[in-house]
Amino acid sequence: HEYDTRLLHSNLAFPLLKELAERGDPIAKKRFAEEIVKRFRSGVRTIQDFLLEEEYLEYLTKEELGVLLGEEAPLYFQLQSQMSEHLDICVNSLNTPNAILLRENKIISLAILDYTILEIPDIIGEFKHLRRIEIFCKSTKIPRWFLQMNTLKALKLEQNYLGGTIHIDGAPYLEELSLMDNQIEEFTLRNAP
């Protein structure tokens, strides 16, 4: 039956499939990865938490992880390639320094703490559903594309290398902006609520 997990209770089928996959059974590996993706994409937070806490996503190939992340997976992988740290996946809150927050198969928040990054990566501007961005790096400027992200509600660019005079025009959707611990001499924000 090619390890159809519907034939056994899930409390038995999932651990059994894991054991067979770890022992190298190719069919079990495939089914185990499919089950991880299926259970994670169900959207049930307790199941997602369990899969994350027990590090089940580590069993997935890049392609399988891409299925789990959905339409913005290529953006995630491209951003990950520009970082020196691993970008974790979270479902409840951004509880690690380098992570994305995934809700309803959409990446809605991003946190980066990586001082090897000299400029805020432009790829971040291509994410369609980001509501919150927290970036701690060595950037000296705020990219203009932040102003065009109409889903963005909170922007935190603390402990960067921003300095001099910063003028932001046309960010009416931003509800929270934090630029603490930079070397900013003058700051103005117009067209904001």
Image (cartoon, rainbow, N blue to C red):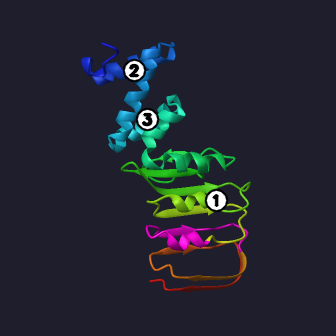
With respect to residue 181, does 187 lie above or below? below
**Magenta stretch contains residue 147:** yes
**Marks 1 and 3, how far apart in space?**
29 Å
Residue type marked 3: Leu
**Magenta stretch contains residue 185:** no
Residue 10 percent coordinates (x, y): 30, 24
Residue topped by disc 1: 121
- Res 78 seen here: yes
Residue at 53 percent of width and 74 percent of height? 147
Residue 69, disc = none
Instruction: Point out the stretch of residues depicted in magenta.
Output: 144-162
**Marks 2 and 1, how far apart in space?**
40 Å
Q: Nearer the viewer, residue 57 or 129?
A: 129
Q: Is residue 160 left or right of residue 65?
A: right
Residue type marked 1: Pro
Earlier-in-chain disc, 1 versus 3: 3
Residue 53 percent coordinates (x, y): 47, 37
Earlier-in-chain disc, 3 versus 2: 2
Residue topped by disc 2: 15
Residue at 54 percent of width and 35 percent of height? 62
In this view, the mark in front (1 or 3)? 1
Residue topped by disc 3: 51
Per the image, label 2 sits on a secondary structure element best described as helix
Residue type marked 2: Pro
